[in-house]
Amino acid sequence: KMVITSKSVTIREFVEGYNNQDNEEKGVTTMNGKLDLRPSFQRSYIRQNDINWKRSLIESIIMGYPIALMYWGDNGDGTYENIDGQQRGITICDFVHNNFEIVIDGIHTPFDRLSDDIQNRILNYELKINICDGTTDEKLKWFEIINQPIATLTMQELRNGVHVGKWLEDAKRYFSAPNSNTRKQVNDGEDKYCAGRYAEKPSIERQEILELALDWASYGLDGNRD
């Protein structure tokens, strides 16, 4: 049975050594490599272009409002893998490393131009973490359970949580990575990676392009490639 314990981590500790390669197969780490913020079963950073959501998160932290719990899996060697909280975690790290701006009194302001008082409010803010100690299967099941109530995961994202491995990571690199050629072709209005069964173009961020590619490769559920 998985054991869950609670701890707090300041944002100052959380953002130390943040390393984001912007590359799906290389992942994202922080806390000087102790936390794998985007392990293999995680989806992409789908909040990348949602500037209003990102600013609202940072403003909540500045005001001292509570934000949602994060869940980490304990690897048993002093390191952790993120189970839930990737979107918040990357957003916080990105802001502290000046990768986007908030608006204060009508002025677009990055972290390093905030007053010392506001910077310290952010850095001293305590993130609430639930540490999950259990088997890989238990952690993956918990990942599925805590994401299902708000229906945020696509079927392919759920499958990725179960069928982990190098083959899947290679497939995600070609069909779901933020900088892949597939993204460019979809954004350019090409229909090459779209199918009539989709009412709208599938989203590369939600790994629906990967799902479609796998469906085509397996000739579809009905055995018909068309």
Image (tube, grey):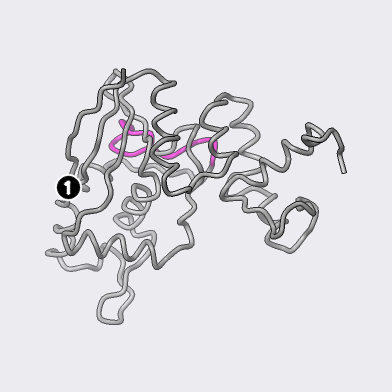
The answer to which of 71 and 48 lies nearer the viewer is: 71
Residue 172 percent location from the top left of the image = 61, 38
> How many numbered marks appear?
1
Residue 92 left/right relative to 44: left
What amino acid is labelled 1 in the image?
A: Glu
Residue 28 counted in the magenta span: yes
Query: Residue at the location (31% across, 53% down)?
Result: 92
The answer to which of 120 and 113 lies nearer the viewer is: 120
Q: Quadrant of residue 214?
A: top right
Residue 127 percent location from the top left of the image = 21, 46
Q: Quadrant of residue 216?
A: top right
Q: Residues within 10 Å of mark 1 (few under 14, many from 20)?
A: many
Residue 18 left/right relative to 209: left
Q: Which residues are magenta?
A: 24-36
Residue 214 left/right relative to 67: right
Residue 105 counted in the magenta span: no
Which residue is farthest left? 117
Q: Is the N terminus in the top left, top right, bottom left or bottom right quadrant?
A: top left
Query: Residue at the location (77% across, 35% down)?
Result: 221
Q: Is the C terminus in the top left, top right, bottom left or bottom right quadrant?
A: top right
Residue on which disc 1 sits: 126
Residue 207 percent location from the top left of the image = 60, 45
Query: Residue at the location (39% across, 44% down)?
Result: 86
The answer to which of 226 and 191 lies nearer the viewer is: 226
Does 143 appear above or below 185?
Answer: above
Q: Quadrant of residue 78?
A: top left
Residue 186 left/right relative to 93: right
Query: Residue at the location (39% across, 26% down)?
Result: 139
**Element assignment for label 1:** strand
Residue 80 percent location from the top left of the image = 32, 29
Query: What secondary structure is the stretch in magenta mostly built from?
Result: loop
